[in-house]
Image: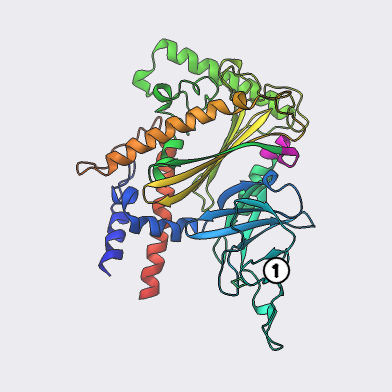
């Protein structure tokens, strides 16, 4: 097949340290392959547990062409199923969020329990075997309240490593006792990989995120040695010693803080807890906490920001008073959904303990600014003169890590295809 050998060639000639060739950003055929190889086979971050606080709470998410329903059962477990009736295939739950008893298809009334078993199907006759027509289950895993699903028959096992490493970092923020304060669905006019690449660097931050430079500092220093003047090296020294001191302080009160980099794993991820700039407490315009009710057992508002980035589709920021999570889902080659969720303590009262605008404005503005950058990156990649350009090894190593991971997954898939064909 000429087409698959073209993709093979594009993948194998990818130059390390450079952005991808244009078809990776704009060819519908490559988006289809991305869905098949990346989104249908890896662990995808889709939701947080507080979106389904009670038994019967149900949400749906669309991953590629698949619609998946997540349902919390009476045993408080959350299960995931393909949102497709086993009778004639109607979509079962058409809303984004709802509360149900059993899962009842409104077409002809087939009814499934919370385990996905078909329990009622009228007029099918005595010989009809209900047990062969249960809902198709989807792998689901909650890591301290962050919900990942995997559509593959066999899900990558190294999610266990991510869970083992990340649980002690995230658990103190106590997602189980949070509520969703706000969700935003932003559609970016660009390929999902441009959204992810943009997230993995802060080269663009100083010029484009005036509201973010204060609260987020982890990408702040990316100077190359020849740019390191006296003032900059003073800043770097000061910040490095602040990290050391704060890490000691946080670790001594049970908050793991050191960097963990597992970006080349199949379920690739990275994390670290860092002080916020200018003695900041949280991701707000005035850098103070947005919610008076701190999370978990926290009493100190100055716990920095714990960031958690995953391949292929998420990033998260955990502060003392609130959490922001981001899920990236491709809609087409040049359109991408960025779903952002803000969590606060479940007992925090809007207007009393927190003000919604104050809580959400930094990331609302930042997301909008990023969407605009992704849009111009997409427009550029569609021009005839576009060619892959070099990443800075000082400020863009994690962009390279993302592309390298992506290309490795593609290579693996194409190699399998070849050996399957031989
Ligand atoms: O642009 C973004 O979305 C990210 C997160 C860290 C750097 N940057 C602000
Ligand atoms: Fe669901 Fe017929 S399609 S009951
Ligand atoms: Fe940004």
Magenta stretch holds residue 206: no
Please provide percent x and percent y for residue 323.
64, 34
**Relative height, residue 103 to residue 20 (above, below):** below
Please provide percent x and percent y for residue 317.
59, 34
Magenta stretch holds residue 173: yes
**Relative height, residue 106 to residue 401 (above, below):** below
Residue 309 in sight in this render: no
| The quadrant where residue 269 appears | top right
Mark 1 secondary-structure assignment? strand
| The quadrant where residue 17 appears | top left
Residue most toward the bottom? 127
The quadrant of the rendering that contains the N terminus is: bottom left
Callout 1 environment at 10 Å: few (<14), some (14 to 19), or many (20+)? Answer: many
**Drawn side of residue 96 relative to residue 350, left or right:** left
Q: Residue at x 69, y 87 (%)?
A: 125
Q: Which residue is mark 1?
A: 112
**Relative height, residue 420 to residue 284 (above, below):** below
Please provide percent x and percent y for residue 5.
28, 64
Ligand 2 has an atom within 8 Å of the beta carbon of the residue at disc 1:
no
**Drawn side of residue 362 relative to residue 24, left or right:** right
Q: Main secondary structure of the magenta part?
A: helix
Residue most toward the top? 231
**Relative height, residue 186 to residue 44 (above, below):** above
**What's the magenta region?**
170-178
Q: How many marks?
A: 1
Residue 248 in sight in this render: yes
């Amino acid at each position: 097949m000429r087409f698959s050998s073209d993709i093979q060639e594009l993948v194998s000639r990818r130059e390390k340290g450079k952005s991808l060739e244009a078809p990776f950003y704009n060819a519908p055929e490559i988006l289809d392959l991305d869905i098949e190889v990346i989104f249908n086979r890896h662990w995808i971050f889709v939701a947080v547990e507080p979106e389904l606080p009670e038994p019967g709470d149900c949400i749906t998410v669309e991953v590629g062409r698949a619609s998946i329903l997540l349902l919390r059962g009476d045993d408080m477990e959350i299960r995931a199923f393909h949102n497709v009736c086993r009778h004639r295939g109607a979509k079962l739950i058409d809303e984004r969020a709802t509360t149900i008893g059993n899962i009842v298809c409104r077409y002809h009334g087939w009814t499934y329990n919370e385990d996905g078993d078909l329990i009622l199907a009228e007029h099918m006759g005595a010989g009809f075997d209900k047990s062969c027509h249960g809902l198709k289950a989807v792998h689901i895993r909650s890591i301290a309240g962050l919900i990942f699903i995997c559509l593959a028959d066999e899900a990558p096992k190294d999610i266990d490593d991510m869970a083992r490493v990340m649980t002690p970092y995230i658990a103190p923020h106590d997602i189980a006792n949070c509520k969703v304060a706000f969700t935003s669905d932003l559609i970016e006019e660009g390929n999902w990989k441009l959204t992810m690449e943009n997230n993995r660097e802060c080269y663009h931050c100083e010029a484009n995120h005036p509201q973010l430079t204060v609260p987020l500092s982890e990408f702040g220093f990316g100077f190359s040695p020849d740019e390191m003047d006296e003032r900059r090296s003073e800043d770097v020294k000061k910040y490095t010693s602040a990290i050391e001191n704060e890490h000691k302080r946080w670790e001594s009160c049970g908050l793991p803080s050191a960097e963990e980099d597992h970006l080349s794993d199949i379920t690739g991820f990275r994390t670290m807890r860092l002080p916020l700039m200018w003695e900041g407490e949280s991701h707000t315009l005035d850098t103070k906490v947005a919610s008076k009710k701190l999370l978990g057992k926290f009493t100190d508002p100055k716990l920095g920001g714990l960031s958690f980035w995953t391949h292929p589709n998420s990033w998260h920021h955990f502060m003392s008073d609130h959490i922001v999570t981001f899920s990236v889902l491709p809609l087409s080659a040049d359109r991408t959904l960025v779903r952002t969720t803000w969590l606060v303590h479940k007992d925090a009262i809007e207007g009393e303990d927190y003000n919604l605008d104050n809580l959400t404005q930094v990331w609302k503005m930042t997301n909008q600014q990023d969407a605009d950058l992704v849009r111009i990156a997409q427009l550029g990649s569609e021009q005839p003169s576009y060619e892959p350009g070099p990443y800075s090894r000082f400020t863009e190593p994690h962009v390279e890590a993302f592309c390298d991971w992506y290309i490795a997954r593609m290579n693996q898939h194409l190699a399998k295809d070849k050996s399957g064909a031989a």
